[in-house]
Amino acid sequence: MITIDVKRVHGDFGFEASDAYGHKIKLDTSPETGGEDFGVRPMQSLLMGLGGCSGIDVVSILKKQRQQVDGFNMHISGEREHGKEPSLWKTVHIVFSLKGNIDPEKAKRACELSIDKYCSVAATLRAAGANITWEVVVE
């Protein structure tokens, strides 16, 4: 079983979440809703989790294919539903940017496998109704 502890540590809405290994992230709401910009918004952390999950998949797949990944970045943008509570992610777009001696077709396939098959965060977002699109740039 996975356990996460969340503790209020700053103002009204500044929280610190930690896992069983001592890794921590700071969470807060926006100043418009009473926060103090202490940390990441919880819904943004979900997109960060998508980036980490998919990034691990893509690099792992490319390494198995003996591709040389010298640089890897992702830019993730999303739009949430308006006027609804809860306000879920409606659309998410990912730009995978890779550097190295990488076959562009292998990079595309690795990203496709991650988003469509392996990444649990992507599957969770899709199950909640999000439309996930992506593109790959190999330099």
Image (tube, rainbow, N blue to C red):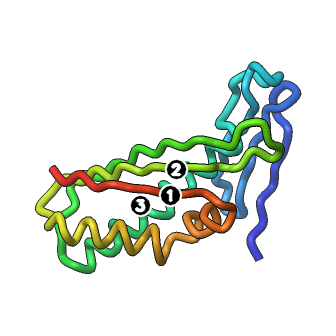
Ranked by sequence position, the earlier of labels 3 and 2 is 3
Looking at the picture, which amino acid does disc 1 mark? Ile
CA neighbours of label 1 inside 10 A, class few (<14), some (14 to 19), many (20+):
some
Q: Nearer the viewer, residue 58 or 135?
A: 135
Q: Circles 1 and 2: CB distance less than 8 Å?
A: yes
Instruction: Write the residue at 11% across / 62% down.
Output: 101
- Which one is closest to the eye, mark 3 or mark 2? 2
Instruction: Write the residue at 50% across / 58% down.
Output: 132
For label 1, the residue is 132
Does residue 79 appear to the left or right of 105 in the view shown?
right
Real-space Cα separation, disc 3 to disc 2, in angstroms: 15 Å
Looking at the picture, which amino acid does disc 3 mark? Gly
Q: Where is residue 25 in the image (x, y as percent from the top left)?
A: 66, 44
Q: Which of 98 and 133 is in front in this view?
A: 133
Against 128, residue 78 (above or below) is above
Real-space Cα separation, disc 1 to disc 2, in angstroms: 5 Å
Q: Where is residue 69 in the image (x, y as percent from the top left)?
A: 22, 61
Instruction: Write the residue at 42% across / 70% down.
Output: 114
Looking at the picture, which amino acid does disc 2 mark? Val
Q: Nearer the viewer, residue 9 or 76?
A: 76
Ranked by sequence position, the earlier of labels 1 and 2 is 2
For label 3, the residue is 55
For label 2, the residue is 92
